[in-house]
Amino acid sequence: MRVVVPTGCWLVKERRGLESRMKNILLVHTGGTLGMNGRRPNALKPGSFFRTVRERVPELTKLAKLEFEVFSNIDSCEMQPELWTRLARRLAERLPHFDGVVVTHGTDTLAETASALSFMLPGLTKPVVLTGAQRPLGEIRSDARLNLIDAVTSAIHGPKEVTVCFDSHLFRGNRVRKVSIAEYDAFDSPNHPVLGVLGVEAKFSDGLRGQGRFKLAAQLDSRVFLLRVFPGLDPEIPLSILPKVHGLVVEAYGAGNFPSSKALGRSLTPLFSQAEALGVPVLVVSQAHRNGVDLSQYESGNAARDHGAISGGDMTVSAAVVKLMHGLANHPGDALRKYLERSVAGERI
Ligand code: ASP
């Protein structure tokens, strides 16, 4: 379910005519289905993107002065923290020369890249809009055309933060989840209202405030592990991983629960006590998509909290993993807990 933009939003229509000049928008291509060519059911191959954009969406140039840049041309399953760091640096370098940026990206790891950019580029004063598509731009019935037009519209008029524009909606970047493989409404942000609706009229709400001066914080420590709790999980397996990692995200049940009974030998409580002993921070998020973790609610959550586990609140799993990487590199030691427990880019309550 998508929530309607809150009141206090602005209509693009009302702002038209106030613009004295066409905005300069940078379009950075990283890859993904949107820019691929090739026929299904064959494997999609990255193709020549910008030629297709000019052919298929010529009206983009009526919306803004566009400059194109190829950052990479990869399926987003190949996206890695090293590339996020390079992308954030490149955007920080180019942003002063533009009014906004659109980043085209595959849908598979779009949530992670959007989260990473939101943490690495705090205090943005211009929109950075990520978009992608379920069908390549060159195909009939592709969703790429409208997604590109809407993303450029959002980069001109939308909130000044990292967002994801998809299927006529604008989402906070670090709040999205990919929810569909084959439908055009591929993204959702279950714990946060949409920031824009691009229907007959384009409406946007205010973005983030109070992040301070813009800065680049592109460092990441990717030595983290994500553990999803499930019935039957042998605690020995995650225990053997602990010495190898700098941080652990536990995707627990519901409010932050996990088996803690000794009866069948599968209590995960020793994982939390061992992590505490080794000084490995543990961030707990929920397998449920709506609402957030509350470690005070049940006994197992209490045990995790007593061993120093940190509640990830209502963060998505993607945002939690990336925030832990970012926190380990930029806010190490005692500062890490505070960094993870507060909202730094609107990623949690
Ligand atoms: N595998 C593709 C990617 O993430 C899927 C897509 O773009 O929709 O790059």
Image: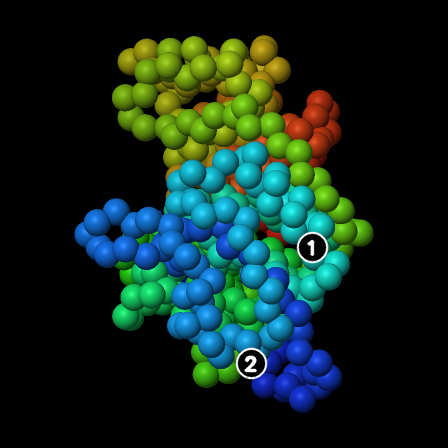
Mark 2: few, some, or many residues within 10 Å (few <14, many ≥20)? Answer: few
Q: Is residue 77 visible?
A: yes
Q: Is residue 294 above or below residue 272?
A: below
**Residue at the image position 41 percent from the left and 66 percent from the top:** 52
Under mark 2, the amino acid is: Lys
Q: Which residue is mark 2?
A: 62
Residue situated furthest right in the rendering: 213
**Residue at the image position 47 percent from the left and 76 percent from the top:** 58
Position of 182 with respect to 55 (left or right) is left
Q: Is residue 327 visible?
A: no
Could you say whether the residue bearing mark 1 is in a helix, strand or loop?
helix
Under mark 1, the amino acid is: Arg
Q: Is residue 300 above or below residue 120?
A: above
Q: Please provide percent x and percent y for residue 205.
A: 60, 70
Question: What's the coloring here?
Answer: rainbow
Position of 1 with respect to 128 (left or right) is left
**Residue at the image position 42 percent from the left and 27 percent from the top:** 227
Rendered image quadrant of residue 332: top right
Q: Which residue is mark 1?
A: 94
Q: Is residue 259 above or below residue 72?
A: above
